[in-house]
Amino acid sequence: MKLTYAGPKPLISHSGIVFDRKKEDKYRYIPFAVSLLLALDHDYTSSQNYTYTPDRKHYSDEELLRVIAAHCPTAQTEAARLRSEKAARLDEELRRLDGSLSHPAEARSVLRTNLLLMRDYRLQRTVNKSLYYSAAGALVTLVAAKRLRYIQTAFTPEYFHVFHTMEGIIRRRRLALAAQLDVYEKKGELMVRLALAGR
């Protein structure tokens, strides 16, 4: 299993390949999820606030994968399964294209070439997305087990995205937790906070 940046979502046609910058590769958020996993995974004393300042360390792809695997042992198996399912869909996409008569032969040929060019790219995006959701799920499991009342950080789009994903996972899992995501200003600095309360 390999973790590496792929890029934004490709839009592939017989006239070329463009990238949808609004659909960023989930790889972008993995280092932030991993830094939260490392920051939150320790013993707590009740009624005490803990402060953690991210060390801004750059983790290698192998280190990121190792931390995710340590917190979610099924992450790589799940990513491999989803990659395999995506590969089957991409193969089917090529089969349908080959059998299609709605496009001229030249357009089909160009589209086929473009799809083949982007195959590994699209598969890597699937792996990255799966590993990101495994990391975010591990964070939810961790905050629930540690009974944390909230986590907050200085606002960055990446931390906001991770917190938003966690909030969604909490709702989907129907945990005995209520999650509330807020962005606010504190002493002139923008903050993001995920409050967690038992239902």
Image: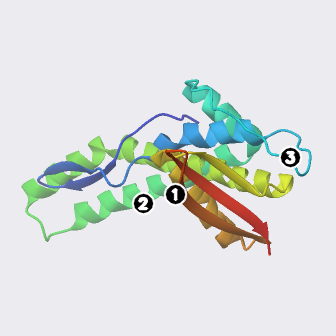
Is residue 51 shown left or right of residue 153?
right
The residue that label 2 is drawn on is 89
Is residue 73 shown left or right of residue 166?
right
| Amino acid beneath label 2 | Arg
Cα–Cα span, label 2 and label 1: 6 Å
The residue that label 3 is drawn on is 48
For label 3, the SS is loop
For label 2, the SS is helix
The crowd level at tag 1 (other Cα within 10 Å; few <14, some 14-19, many 20+) is some
Q: Taking 91 as reference, is 37 above or below it? A: above
Q: Nearer the viewer, residue 122 or 148?
A: 148
Residue at horizontal 44%, vertical 36%? Answer: 5
Q: Name the N-terminal-most of marks 3 and 2.
A: 3
The residue that label 1 is drawn on is 85
Q: Nearer the viewer, residue 103 or 141?
A: 141
1 or 3: mark nearer the eye = 3
Q: Quadrant of the C terminus?
A: bottom right
Q: How many circles with numbers are drawn on the protein?
A: 3
| Amino acid beneath label 3 | Gln
Circles 3 and 2, Cβ within 8 Å, touching? The answer is no
Cα–Cα span, label 3 and label 2: 50 Å
The crowd level at tag 2 (other Cα within 10 Å; few <14, some 14-19, many 20+) is few
Circles 2 and 1, Cβ within 8 Å, touching? The answer is yes
Is residue 138 shown left or right of residue 111?
right
Q: Which mark is residue 197?
A: none
Give x and y (percent) for residue 178. Answer: 72, 71
Q: Nearer the viewer, residue 182 or 138?
A: 182
